[in-house]
Image (cartoon, coloured by chain):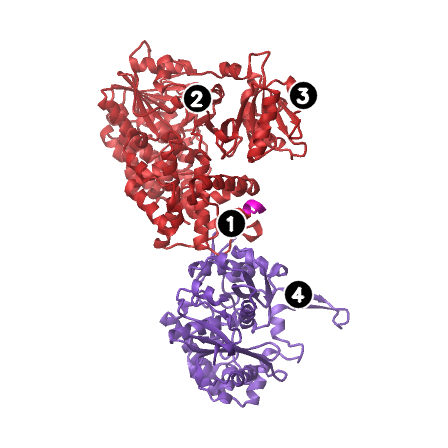
Chain colours: A purple, B red
Amino acid sequence: MTTDDLMLPKARIPYGTWGSSYFPAWQTSALAEVNIGQFAGESMNRILGLRGVPKSQLEYLVIGSTVPWHWKFWNAPLVASCLGQRIPGYHVEQACATGLQAVLLAGAEVQAGTYDVVGVLTFDRTSDSPVGVFPERRAHERTLPISDVWDNFGFDPATGNAMITCAGKAARKYRTDRREVDELAFHRHEQYFEAKNSGFLERVLVPLDVLNVQGRPLGRIDDDLGVRRLTLGVVRAMRELDTCVTSGTQTHASDGMATLLVTSKDKARELSPRSEIEIQFVAKTEVRTHPSLMPEAPLFAVQKLLGKTGLTMADMAVVKNHNPFAVNDVIFSKVMEYDWTCMNKTGSPLVWGHPQGPTLTRVLIEALEEAVSLGGGHVLVFGCAAGDVGIAAVLKVS
Amino acid sequence: MTKTMREPTLQTLGLGTVIDIFQRGRMPADAGGLVEKVFGKSGKRGSMVISGANGIVGAGKTMQLGSRLQPYGVRIVALDFPSAPDGIGKQYPGLVRAFGQDNANKIMANITRLSYDGVNLPAELQQLRPRFLLEAIPELLEIKRAHYKIFREAFPDIEIRSVTSGFPSSELGVGIAHPAFPHEINKIWEVVEPEPSAVTQLFWALGLIPLPVSDHWSFVLDVLFCGLTLAGMRYHQASNMPFWKIDKFTRKLVGPNPFRAHDAIGARGANFLTWSCLHHLSEKYGEVFKPTADLIERKETGQNWYPLNHFRPLVDWSLDTDQQEEFRVWILGPLFQMTSLMLQERRAHLAHLNAIGELCAQFRRGILAVMRSLGPEAVAQTVKVYHRLHPEAAGASWFPEVLGQMEASEWQQLYVNAEHDGKVGVVTISRESYNGDVDQELNRALDWLKAEGIAKVIVTGDFHLSTQMVGADTSDFFPALEKVEEGSRISSGWSRTARRLNDEFEISIGFVGGKRCLGGMLELLMHCHYLVAVEGSELGMPEVTLPVVPGMEGCHWPFRKTRPDHWPRVLELLLSGRSVQASEAVGWLVDHVGPMDDALQMAWKLATKGDHRVSRRAVESSALDGIPKELPGLPAADAPGTEAARRAIVACIDDACHTTLAEALTAQAKHSAEFMLSSACREGRIGAEYTRTMAV
């Protein structure tokens, strides 16, 4: 594959300028108390400071989130003010695809030559999500109050089904075996704890101290709270909520933020602590599958992506996905004939949670960091999103 | 023939030495005479005009000078544009608090407010006979010059001073009287004039503190303050650390929080002034002063440095040891470099240069005291490392050679001076609170007097920088909150210094010439053989309210110097924390009280063994019996900490008095040091200040 074949040949992700908060489960940390937009802005500034990137380098900001937050009307410019840099920008939202989509859109800004340094900042607070009141005179209920996270998870207006129903339906379609799903979920947890114990996570996750309004400590965000070390026996003993879906084989809601930069080639060299590393955008696909079969959508996105690029799974140095249900990975492996133990080696959202906006950003950051530690190669990142959507992208680390 | 350790700062005002004051038995200048000189005789008395009187500076100075000049019949003319928002009216509540309703009304009634269009002076001004213009209009050179021109055309003999914070007198064509924030109460004025003028001496006689500085861009205060702000901005650029957090680390390191100060003063005006000072300084002195992009943006927008209230900071920042060192270099490096420039240009008497930071910019210790404690090599090394971080700053305005003079007495005696006439010595303390620097300098001053063969000494404030003596600088106690050895070192060290006044001189006199003498300063002066105070001054031991246990022998020394029937009064002083009027303490705490001239004359008589008829109270060196442990009628403590401190003070009195004088010092130091580790102390004012300042 040549540079001419790259999706965004002018765009780069400067290695080592990224960072993510830990993702504590909802209602377990100080993040349940904050304006997450402000937290994300201030955290991005802190992370850039720790990475040695002056915030004055930022020219534009693409933010991504899915749960409404206080003063969201003011959008990226407000978040930019919170990080201390008055720059323009906009907001992108595509459920759990938000994190990857935001990075790709930032790449498009660089590719277009509009900016040399674009910040990507994704965040969400699922804790105590706001309740929207929607006066709709044609609806028989007249006025509908919606608790943003809980009510949306429970009801896809296009199909009338809940998220969990998608997982069960897909499991039945692909005749997945509960035992394999349980083993996969257990293995994913083991992968996470292995990465954590090895110190890998500390290379991408940044502990952050949260203050109350008096300026006193409110809490330290330094762990993916809610992640439990499970035994296979415990996973197997869990009550099935739908086919192959238990509380151990599905993700949980969490809060957090994740950020990275997308820049021109020259700026990447200038800003990265290891300028010899180059990270390029190769290709991206999105698909929408049949109603309520969301877990198969990422598979189709990857198949389409491989067909488009001529790459094979064997070409991938790192494979990592957003997997809210363990059945996602089982279906992917079954159809692609790909060993599921070879993917998500440093953990995945199935284990560390699901704050939506920043989920795929953290997946991407971990995948790129893993690729660098392996000496480079192609990185396949993919995942599902509300609306039976699958998204996939390939990046190249060299 | 008077000999001085270093030049007394009063001399910079043309007011002679401090020993002159005692020798003559009167102050070197009186306000009435100087008012006559500046504003004319009564009946033909002219007025003072303050232009830009509704601005922050103008309104503050209208109050400060208006309240002082009103008793002399000098009318204040407050001049401003008709559209200027009322800044003077806002000052009225403060005026009432300070002077009471009736006096506040008199002061306000003495202010004539006039409007003008910036070009033509109002006709009414003529009949008000302006004699002195204090210009406080915006910091734009051409506008200021035009302003002086219209005044000079109308009133050729008028004295003019500009409050400019940056422009030299040579650029403006008028003298400078640059005041420090907050303008209604801060007494400091940087003064630029060829020779000390009657206006400057009048300011001094009115209780203000004029400090002569040289005619260089931004003088001293704004080199320090704007320079420190700039250093914070540069660190922000280098690290992304938000300004509010830089403020906290800066406060921990040196004392001020410059960004908060900008917001408190009013960001729009303060940002412009800081930019203006730095812009002009950088044009003359190079990159070390160059404003950053953040400042230029805020100069134009007037944005605050701190987030708005609904966006109070959410994510904290911390620094590891290496990062703290880098922060130190980013802040102190440029400050040291800028100070070297000011020293090279001899911008001020070193005591002034040092004090301006403390009195006007919240420095815990003056910049010269900080540099002196580090030593020349460490200072030069800090600047060297700073230049590695900011190479452009190395090109100009760095004068390491000035650090070689650090051993000279001008550097060594920043807070304490000594003078003598061959027989009597005078030690002057120019710092209102006692700290380690003062202690060391006082010892050097006493050594010097002894080496000069002086056996009689008066210890006093300096009649210039220090207008009162408020006690110990409690920030010196911060290490003592962690380690008992630190508390013991401070208490016993300072007590030994105080004892020298009793032990090593034939006659020693403590002189209280200001509004009050409290805590550690009172403990120091009570070690003198005699204590003389000016009428109206207050004496007190407020330690119990902080709470701490007095550390400089306050729990036994005053008992040893007075009769048993006075012991309850001493106990009350210690346990209530309330001050007493000096006149109520004659015979048991003070030896003489009188009006200023009388007190000065008595101090001199005591020192020269004149006919003073004051008997010397001996210090009882054996153990005392019968010290009361309770005080009938003492109101209940208003806080648990106060109650704990009372118990600790009583225990300290008990131990320190029931032993010999020789042993008492150790007993007192032990109690004082141990109490500083207690939860009562840590939860009290000092502990709170320590947490606020040091636990960043």
Q: What element carries label 4?
A: strand
Disc 3 on helix, strand or loop? helix
Q: Residue B666 at x, y = what percent?
A: 25, 35
Q: Is residue B302 magenta?
A: yes
Crowd class of label 3 (few under 14; some 14 to 19; many from 20; radius 10 Å): few
Residue to which mark 2 is pinned? B195
Residue B548 visible, this orientation: no
- Real-space Cα separation, disc 3 to disc 2, in angstroms: 33 Å
Dot 1 or dot 2: first in sequence order is 2
- Which amino acid type is shown beneath numbered disc 4? Gly
Earlier-in-chain disc, 3 versus 1 = 3
Which quadrant holds residue A308? bottom right
Observer-side mark, 1 or 2, equals: 2
User: Decide: marks 1, 2 in contact (CB < 8 A)?
Assistant: no
Depth check: give the residue in front, A157 or B393: B393
What are the residue bounds of the magenta stretch?
B298-306
Left or right? Give the position of B198 relative to B525.
right
Q: Mark 3 points at which residue?
A: B124
Residue type beneath disc 3: Glu
Q: Distance between the residues labelled 1 and 4?
A: 39 Å
Q: Is mark 1 on a helix, strand or loop?
A: helix
Looking at this view, is B417 or A279 the one in front?
A279
Residue B440 can be seen, yes or no:
yes
- The amino acid at mark 1 is Asp
Give A8 or A340, whichever is nearer the viewer. A8
Answer with mark 3 or mark 2, whichever residue precedes in sequence.
Answer: 3
Identify the disc placed on residue A132.
4
Do badges 1 and 4 share one subunit?
Answer: no
